[in-house]
């Protein structure tokens, strides 16, 4: 499912990487607690061709303004790089909690690794995380690992087969493959954009209060129960855990009135729904009742959201044929 090692390849190169939604444990994962993520079948594609000047989508300024690409260029250093004409195309809404930056980092790391001789997926996961964390300054490797691995992955859980471990600043996260039950999920962007790093810092302050450790224990218990519910293909139990996780996210202050309105729309047509990603805007994820998916999409759209029916992306970040 992950997609195997990245082979050595010269330019021109094209890579594709999926977005993600977090089913359980966002924010708490930054503090070492368990998380479950689904790589979703919305993708970012990145094309890299030899160029006369370094630019992104035709503009040198766009490259300098993109924190992930400019970070990658700094890492490579002027000496090691011929000019590259970068192009991106994405179906993942930006700043929406659906992994657009993780997918860009995973695609970028795929291209760079291929140019530098290729390598295993664990190395790709480490490189993609380094790009995202380098640009955002905070965060866990959950999002980039899901984009590199595809399918369903757990972080900091004993459930599933070990894929890799990622370290940063003395903290270590374990990433495992969890079998995907094949369910259809609905994600819906509220239209309210926000910065992940701001939400992560605000939750960090909230968790530094005296009841922080007890709250983190509750996040961990909910995510652990949620992972077990998905593994045993129990939709009712999964829905209960989604709702419980949403209560905790409300308690740490990252819900938003637009997210609450969309969750209320999803409630009668789903087993459960919650915000997904950093919150404070962004998106929700719902597990629809079988047969009610289309109605759910219509109602979310009528409520002003931008909904997508998604499934697990069958593979993670990968090279794809570059256009001639
Ligand atoms: C953002 O998609 C998920 C957070 O848990 C941050 C992170 O894990 O890097 C809020």
Image (cartoon, helix red, strand yellow):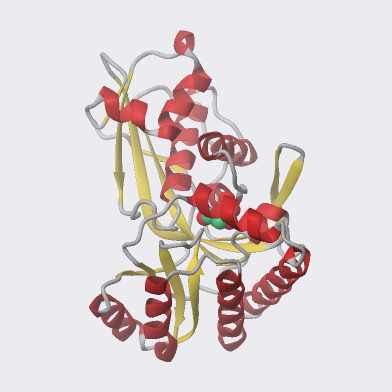
Instruction: Look at 58% across and 35% down and name the residue there.
Output: 130
Q: Can residue 147 be seen in this view?
A: no
In the rendered view of the protein, which quadrant contains the N terminus?
A: bottom right
Within the displayed image, which quadrant is ligand 1 positioned in? bottom right
Q: Can residue 252 be seen in this view?
A: yes
From what the image shows, is residue 138 above or below residue 1? above
From what the image shows, is residue 26 above or below residue 58? below
**Residue 104 horizontal/vertical position (percent):** 42, 42
**Residue 261 horizontal/vertical position (percent):** 38, 79
**Residue 28 horizontal/vertical position (percent):** 66, 60
- Left or right: 171 as drawn, with respect to 71: right
Instruction: Look at 72% across and 56% down and name the residue there.
Output: 208
In the rendered view of the protein, which quadrant contains the C terminus?
A: top left
From what the image shows, is residue 240 above or below residue 167? below
- Left or right: 305 as drawn, with respect to 182: left
From what the image shows, is residue 186 above or below residue 1? below
Q: Looking at this view, is 79 or 317 the one in front?
A: 79
Name the quadrant containing residue 12: top left
Instruction: Look at 69% across and 60% down and name the residue there.
Output: 207
Name the quadrant containing residue 260: bottom left
- Left or right: 105 as drawn, with respect to 89: right
Instruction: Look at 35% across and 31% down and name the residue there.
Output: 65
């Amino acid at each position: 499912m992950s997609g195997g090692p990245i082979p050595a390849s010269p330019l021109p190169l094209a890579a594709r990487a999926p977005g993600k939604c977090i089913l359980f444990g966002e924010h708490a994962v930054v503090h070492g607690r368990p998380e479950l993520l689904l790589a979703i079948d919305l993708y970012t594609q990145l094309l890299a061709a030899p160029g006369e000047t370094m630019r992104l989508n035709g503009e040198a300024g766009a490259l300098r303004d993109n924190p992930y690409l400019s970070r990658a260029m700094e890492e490579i250093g002027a000496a090691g790089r011929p000019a590259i004409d970068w192009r991106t195309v994405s179906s993942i809404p930006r700043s929406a909690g659906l992994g657009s930056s993780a997918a860009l980092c995973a695609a970028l790391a795929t291209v760079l690794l291929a140019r530098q001789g290729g390598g295993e997926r664990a190395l790709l996961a480490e490189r993609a995380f380094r790009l995202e964390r380098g640009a955002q300054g905070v965060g866990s490797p959950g999002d980039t690992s899901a984009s590199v691995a595809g399918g369903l992955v757990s972080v900091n859980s004993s459930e599933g087969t070990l894929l890799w471990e990622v370290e940063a600043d003395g903290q270590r996260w374990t990433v495992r493959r969890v079998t995907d039950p094949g369910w259809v999920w609905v994600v819906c962007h509220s239209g309210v954009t926000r910065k992940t790093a701001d939400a992560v810092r605000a939750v960090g302050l909230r968790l530094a209060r005296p009841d922080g450790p007890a709250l983190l224990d509750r996040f961990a218990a909910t995510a652990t129960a949620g992972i077990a519910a998905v593994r045993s293909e129990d939709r009712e139990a999964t829905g209960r855990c989604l709702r419980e996780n949403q209560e905790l996210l409300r308690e740490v202050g990252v819900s938003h009135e637009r997210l609450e309105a969309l969750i209320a729309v999803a409630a009668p047509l789903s087993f459960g729904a919650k915000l997904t990603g950093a919150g404070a805007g962004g998106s929700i994820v719902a597990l629809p009742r079988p047969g009610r998916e289309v109605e759910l999409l219509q109602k979310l759209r009528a409520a002003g959201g931008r909904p997508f029916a998604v499934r697990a992306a069958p593979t993670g970040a990968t090279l794809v044929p570059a256009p001639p």
